[in-house]
Amino acid sequence: MCRQAESPQQDDSLVRLSVNCFLFDRSGIDRVLIDCGAGGSWDPSMGHLVEAMAEAGVETSSITVIALTHAHGDHINGLLMPDGRRAFNSLRKIMIGQDAVEEFLAEPELEEFRPLLAPINGGDRLADHLLAVAIPGHARGHMGYLLNTDEEDVLFCGDLIHVPAAQFARPELTWAYDDDDSIARASRIKLLQGAADTHIWLAGAHLGRPGIGRVVEEGEGFAFIPAAKPLTTELS
């Protein structure tokens, strides 16, 4: 949703909601940006992807492919700068769940990106080491992305978790904006159990900094152990 939203009230009683994007960067192939944030729609606390990329030494012009987890505003608005210019001038492909295309194109400001849309489904291989994973329940066409490496795997799980402080320990708790509570709950329990069993890294759009870590079983639920340092993995 690209319409200007009201600035969020700064209230200590509110739950802090992180919004993360991730960059898949392998020498010799396209850089893949997973989600592109809220853009200028939710100032002042969101929409700082371009500045964060600059701090990391990543030029926006180097991004040629974006893989969207779904078509909610805090994941797609970053395609445009606050003044309406494209944020990524070299962009040539936007991968998006087949069932999310209609919602994406419902935003008039995004019509210009129609020729770049590349609809995908769960199980599609997007690159040598990157696989689309359907994660139903939160939104139509909600996709995760599984990065297979020579060392360890990483699952970029989109909006599987919104409130880490509650939903790891009690994964049955749902988010008010989930499209289907029961399906979202089942997806969350299944993927968290899988992450705990296989010891893969879990990266989420709404996990607190650094946004990536391990899942372990704890009591009747789970616990999230954030990565202690930047994660780098080797690909052959």
Image (cartoon, grey):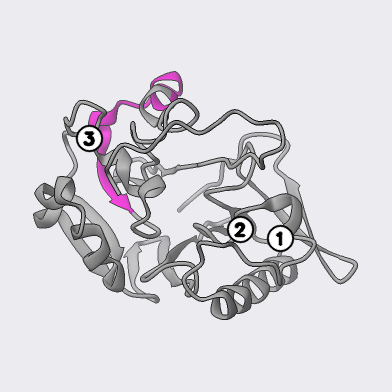
**Relative to residue 21, is residue 101 depicted above or below?**
below
Secondary structure of the residue carrying tag 1 is helix
Residue behind mark 2: 161
Residue behind mark 1: 167
- Closer-to-camera residue (180/31): 180
Percent position (x, y) of residue 203? 57, 51
- Of mark 1 and mark 2, the one earlier in the sequence is 2
Labelled pair 1, 2 in contact (Cβ < 8 Å): yes
**Kind of residue at badge 2:** Ile
**Kind of residue at badge 3:** Phe
Q: Is residue 62 magenta?
A: yes
Q: Which mark is residue 104?
A: none
Percent position (x, y) of residue 58? 36, 27
Secondary structure of the residue carrying tag 2 is loop
Q: Is residue 212 left or right of residue 236?
A: right
- Closer-to-camera residue (196/142): 142
Percent position (x, y) of residue 188? 62, 70
Q: Residue at x 72, y 37 (%)?
A: 13
Q: State which region is magenta.
A: 52-67
Image depth: mark 3 or mark 1 in front: 1
Residue behind mark 3: 88
**Kind of residue at badge 1:** Gln
Secondary structure of the residue carrying tag 3 is loop
**Relative to residue 83, is residue 141 depicted above or below?**
below
Q: Residue at x 18, y 59 (%)?
A: 105
Categorize mark 2 by other alpha carbons within 10 Å: few (<14), some (14-19), many (20+). Answer: many
